[in-house]
Amino acid sequence: MSAALLNAGLGLPQAFARLLIDWQRLHGRSGLPWQHTRDPYRVWLSEVMLQQTQVGTVLQYFPRFLDRFPSVQALAAASADEVMALWAGLGYYSRARNLHRCAQAVVAQHGGVFPVKAWELQTLPGIGASTAAAIAAFCHGERVSIVDGNVRRVLSRLLAFDGDLAQTTRQREMWDLAQALLPDEPSPEDMTTYTQGLMDLGATVCVRRRPACERCPVQTLCRAFDAGTVLNYPVKTRQLKRRHESWWLLLLCRRSLAGAGQVWLERRPAPGIWAGLYCPPVYSSEAALLAAVPEPCHALFQPQQTVAHSLTHRELRLQPWLLDARELQPPLASGGQWVDLGALHAHGLPSPVRQMLTHLLA
């Protein structure tokens, strides 16, 4: 279905927009801390955090970020370690790296003021088309639609759009349809409400597995509901290929002169998993780990319980081996250092590593 055909079809665009706006004002979410603001910094920060992350999780991180970095200038001036430490546990760490780079670009290239138009926002690091549209719509009332994963699901069901969204051409067609559904000449307030309504509908009603069609404000317009095929959409044939990997972690611990426990941590290289975060030395096999430590120490190893951890494209099996280092010099590696267990919070650590160290070495 083309945008032209959509516009020709029984007044669907304006009917959809009006129903969605009215529903959002009555039933949509209204108490989230990043709502009711036209501050691009706060909207941008929330949008980045909400990418592939549940609202409940973001609610824990958003206020902490604002307390530490109340402005884009404060974020730009921070060190990468400060940003990663505060982001630790939120996952998808490339977002944190891009967040920092974007803040620096806004300050250096735009005098600390975010661009107004969606197309210009997309020139900044880490801001894609949907995030740019959200900032422009929420902060400046620009007539442009977000098209994130939730919105694709809502619109593909509404229109019974059977194009394969694994294909770039079909994604572009969905983008065109999303723009065709926008309200006609909306006020800034209507544009904000419409955009929030799309988010709320996808997050709370038109969910992936058990959509609450009985509560949907646009049920009467939904072609998939009318045909009884809601769960057939969206169509996406390319499946995520997951790799399974086993990592051996060398947990070198010791007591400092002051008696505090310490652990040896190294910065993870970029690119790669957990790039820029701190982690115990990682080895791809038991033999590689043993080869990194003098043979007389092998009998002192204490293998710990294996930890399973899921990433977007990988399933990791983390196999920590604990060793009391005492006089042992750790393997030399760039960025390695002894860290007091009481100072782990100041270092960006992957959440399974932080939990592991807190449990094992407390």
Image (tube, rainbow, N blue to C red):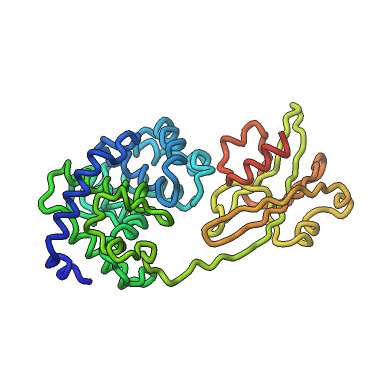
Side (left or right) of 117 relative to 252: left
Side (left or right) of 193 relative to 323: left
Q: Residue at x 31, y 39 (%)?
A: 29
From the viewer's perspective, is residue 346 above or below residue 242? above
From the viewer's perspective, is residue 74 above or below residue 172? above
Q: Quadrant of residue 316?
A: bottom right
Q: Quadrant of the C terminus?
A: top right
Residue 244 drawn at (x, y percent): 63, 64
From the viewer's perspective, is residue 144 above or below residue 71? below
Q: Is residue 330 visible?
A: yes
Residue 283 drawn at (x, y percent): 70, 58
Q: Residue at x 80, y 57 (%)?
A: 290
Residue 209 drawn at (x, y percent): 43, 56
How many numbered discs sit on the rendered protein? 0
Residue 260 drawn at (x, y percent): 72, 29
Q: Quadrant of the N terminus?
A: bottom left
Front in this rendered view, residue 222 or 70: 222
Q: Quadrant of residue 6?
A: bottom left
Front in this rendered view, residue 23 or 358: 23
Q: Residue at x 80, y 53 (%)?
A: 293
Residue positioned most to the top: 258
Q: Quadrant of residue 75?
A: top left
Side (left or right) of 148 relative to 244: left
Q: Residue at x 34, y 56 (%)?
A: 148
Q: Is residue 123 visible?
A: no
